[in-house]
Amino acid sequence: MGPHEGLGLEITELRLGLPGGSGGGGGEKKRVFSGGGKNGNMDLVVGWPPVCLYKKNNICHVTKMYVKVSMDGAPFLRKVDLSCFKGYSELGMGLEKLFGCSGIGEAMKEESESCEYTAIYEDKDGDWMLVGDVPWLMFTETCKRLRIKRRSYANGSRLHGTNT
Amino acid sequence: MGFPEEVLEHVFSFITSHTDRNVVSLVCKSWYEIERWCRRRIFVGNCYAVSPAMMIRRFPEVRSVELKGKPHFADFNLVPDGWGGYFYPWICEMARAYPWLEEIKLKRMVVTDDNLELISKSFKNFKVLVLSSCEGFSTHGLAAIAANCRNLRELDLRESEVEDLSGHWLSHFPDSCTSLQSLNMSCLSSEVSFSALQRLIARSPNLKTLRLNRAVPLEKLSTLLRRAPQLVELGTGAYSAEIRPDVYANLTEAFSRCKEVKGLSGFWDVLPSYLPAIYSVCSRLTSLNLSYATIQSPDVTKIITQCPNLQSLSVLDYIEDTGLNALSLSCKDLRELRVFPSDPFVANANVSLTEQGLVAVSEGCSKLQSVLYFCRQMSNSALTTIAKNRPNLTCFRLCILEPRAPDYLTFEPLDVGFGAIVEHCKQLQRLSLSGLLTDRVFEYIGKWAKKLEMLSIAFAGDSDLGLHHVLSGCDSLRKLEIRDCPFGDKALLANVSKLETMRSLWMSSCSVSLGACKRLSQKMPRLNVEVIDEQGDLDSRPDNCHVEKLYIYRTVAGPRFDMPSFIRTMDQNPTYRS
């Protein structure tokens, strides 16, 4: 290899990243590192930053926690990464963006009669639970799938063993 | 030297460091003989540098063996699966030759369940098993150790990758086993039987170190602590539970009874409301590992400001500059600081942690010797300040997350800053570089870093001159690991004899040609020059092609034969090619 790219070019190369962020709420644009691979691909650099594999796997923040979300009346299920959110209100906002409606966030904070939605989740034991009761981190560990129920749909529906 | 053998042996028994014993053995033939018969502890830094048979032939009465396998960069996924580092040949020979073996300590090696079973059945007085970053075994192997090692004192699985089939292994410790002093199962994911764990702890009066795994719930921690008030090192399991006053009260009370606790770790999934339960032990803490605790700066700060005797802290970058500032004011005895990135794969800062935090600690903590710091920006002036503040640094590992990031204030390379580190810190033994660096930084390193033993380089340098400076200047260099640097044939071939004075050299994604590897191997018969190339078909490659990865190490055992097809040892003598 001869003399290398000038300073400016390297910096420019590193500024280009993958567009968008991860699925679901978040909303922030996240850049990932590129090594400016040999073909000019913006590949993730293997083994960089040098964080032990063991550490990577054990910091819950880095583990992806994708769960399915169904909403009454929506034709398709979506998936969200729970590790993107820091708490229930962020999750609520994320879901509102995903399904293009408001009020889900409120449903998680209060059990008010006036809320149009009820958010429930299936936990590790297979039980359907109301979202918002347990600490956030505990929720992310035990939540297997989410369901947003509309008041108008909720009447008469069985919560246990409900499948989309 | 007219002393009788017994006297010399007695004198030698006070000499414990490996280097000192090696020196003793070189004094004369009779000292060599006496020394080899009374050597009890062996450390082999590279398991391929010597064969088990050679070790056993020279040292017949060994009680403790420590081996290291894979290169350090295996921690970062750079060493392909199947590379090697098998414990098998060692345990086969040792099982026959060392019936009185008491300790086995392995790092980055491949250990199987059969190996573990062989350990458990071969050594009647087996006491200590440490498996650090090892892999290849399952909880079945652990069950054999638990069941058969009657005098087991220490079982430490730190950071190993274990095939976790069930938590049942722990129940294999017989009721008669009361010798346990140290148990580290933090890397396991399965839940063990709580009652078995409880009973094991209750019948181990000498238990000093207990590192639980994440699956041990917080609600049950107080029950365990009450049975082990003599603990010195504790690793909690998951540190969150439903908020219940009785759980909190029990936990607080249990911690307050632990008058001997000096070290805490664990803290997965921390719920901040439960943190005050540990406050009663804080004043005695010398070691605190919060590197899995995703808690924000105020909560971290509240803890560390209560730990005036802290010597070692591992923490996530959630601590931020404010927390590090508090650390510098509260913890005047700090020797070691490790700050890990909470979100390493994102370029934008998610936390307010900059070079200022490290500068503050370097100012306030006069005993600081060892630093591992991940951050997103650095400047030459900060590095120079740190170097002048802390000339007593022995280990400085800086990782600026973005490769080739320049000084964020001046946009210059960080050569001058790292130069200041090596110039002022004359006892520096370990250094990891990052950021934008030219050949100049290596000039400084070659000139000043005379005590440097281990150097890690990534995305740095301009030419072979950089590598040449290091190889020709660093008198104490033992381990050199390099990735993604424009270093090629010239520097290597100009410094061949240096390589025999080192344990090993790793180079990946550099510019070394296959031909140079062959020439190096021919010149240096006591080096193994191993080329790793997963693209296949090494035999048909032209000599001028660049090798993917290169691992060179000195050895008296000749080339190894346990490699996968994509690794080749370069021929030492082409006339004997089959």
Image (tube, rainbow, N blue to C red):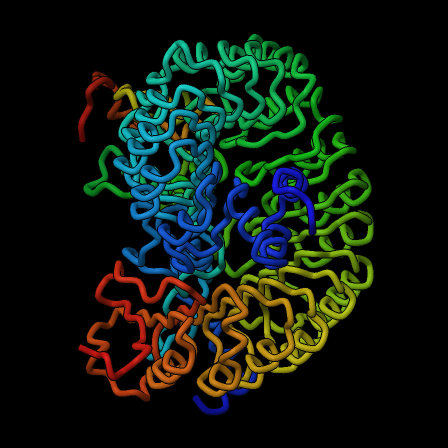
**Would residue A71 be found to the left or right of residue B58 on screen?**
left
Q: Residue at x 81, y 41 (%)?
A: B332
Residue B411 in sight: no
**Would residue B153 be found to the left or right of residue B250 on screen?**
left
Q: Residue at x 29, y 25 (%)?
A: B166
**In this figure, what is the number of numbered marks?**
0
Q: Is residue B368 above or below residue B212?
A: below
Most foreground residue, B61 or A50: B61
Residue B61: horizontal and vertical position, in percent? 46, 39
The C terminus of chain B lies in quadrant: bottom left
Q: Quadrant of residue B123?
A: top left
Q: Residue at x 75, y 43 (%)?
A: B334
Residue B475: horizontal and vertical position, in percent? 64, 71
Most foreground residue, B571 or B557: B557
Q: Residue at x 30, y 48 (%)?
A: B89
Residue B63: horizontal and vertical position, in percent? 48, 36
Most foreground residue, B146 or B22: B22
Residue B26 in sight: yes
Most foreground residue, B519 or A72: B519
**Would residue B543 be found to the left or right of residue B247 on screen?**
left
Q: Quadrant of residue B532?
A: bottom left
Residue B110: horizontal and vertical position, in percent? 33, 47
